[in-house]
Image (cartoon, coloured by chain):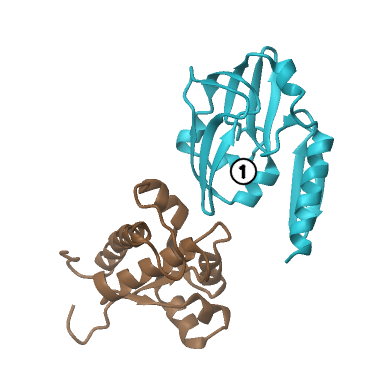
Amino acid sequence: MPEYLEITVDKFTFKVATDRYYNGEGMWARPEGNNVRIGLSDYVQQRSGDVAFAEVKPQGTGVNFDEEVAVIETIKVNISLGSPVAGTVIEVNPAMETAPEVINQNPYETGWLAVIEATDWAADQGRLMDPKAYFARIKVEAEQEVSHR
Amino acid sequence: MTDTEPKPRVIIVPCSGIGKTYGSVSREAAYVLTEEIRPGETQLVALSMLVLGDESARAAVAANPAVTIDGCKLACATKMVKESGGEVVQDFAVLEVYRRYKQFKPQGIAELNEGGQQLAGALAQEIAAVVDALVSEDSDGGRNG
């Protein structure tokens, strides 16, 4: 079980798992040996609404850093998700086909999207935010949104 | 059944989510069902009337089986029917129905797009099947279409 940073803004509580890195779109990347597991942050899944469909690039697909690796359709929006790591998709979460709502239910664990065999994780990691930096970013965003209502 | 016997009615309670696409789909499905494809077997009850405690709405829900249509996971329609003393024989969630009809992508709020209308139609047909089963259970000899 990861540990979390938490912030409550208005009626929403957002969690940021502390054992991984984040890109500006709210995609997380967690290294696992030579591979990197990726998914969507709690903040983005809550803002985006209930997921209707999730399509992840199939196993064997090569992706560059920030290149689209998945598209999710929610009750509010369609979102193209850029990969937080360059490499090759070696595993796709089978739940994306049958029960994509796991992204909403458990975005940091069972709601993962894919595992990427990284080309150069060290380089990509340097382009991502650590949990504290991402937490600070969403805190500002969420508070600004509430103050503008 | 004779002409003098009251027909069994199934109460349909859709989401009241104004300003939400899935709420609009739920209401459109309820209109299609109660006004076009099963007008004799169903009765529409507005969720807002249950929320306000309207006596006739509560009585209708308490006396008949209800099918609810929820636009989001808050499931207000289902919760309100139960709180009003009603029995929900089946609850439909628009998102779940959409997953079965991916080709009908709903958009729009005040006016649904074609996909939304088609999804509402498909949802109405699914509910009609439930209504038919309920009416058949309550009738002598069942229903023939």
List x then y, in percent, for residue A90.
54, 17
Q: Quadrant of the C terminus of chain A?
A: bottom right
Image height of B130 relative to B18, above or below: above
Q: How many marks?
A: 1
Q: Secondary structure at mark 1?
A: helix
What x and y, as percent, mark residue A111? 60, 35
Q: Which chain is cyan?
A: A
Which chain does the numbered disc 1 sit on? A
The residue at the point 70 percent across, 13 percent down is: A33
Mark 1: amino acid: Gln
In the rendered image, the quadrant that contains the N terminus of chain A is top right
User: Of residues A77 and A123, which is closer to you in this image?
Assistant: A123
Q: Residue at 48%, 17% (x, y): give it.
A: A60
Give the quarter of the image for residue B139: bottom left
Q: Quadrant of residue A11?
A: bottom right
Q: Position of residue B27 (x, y in %)?
A: 42, 69
Chain B color in figure: brown
**Please, is residue A113 above or below residue B32 in the view?**
above
B59 or A57: which is nearer to us? A57
Quick check: B28 left or right of A62?
Answer: left
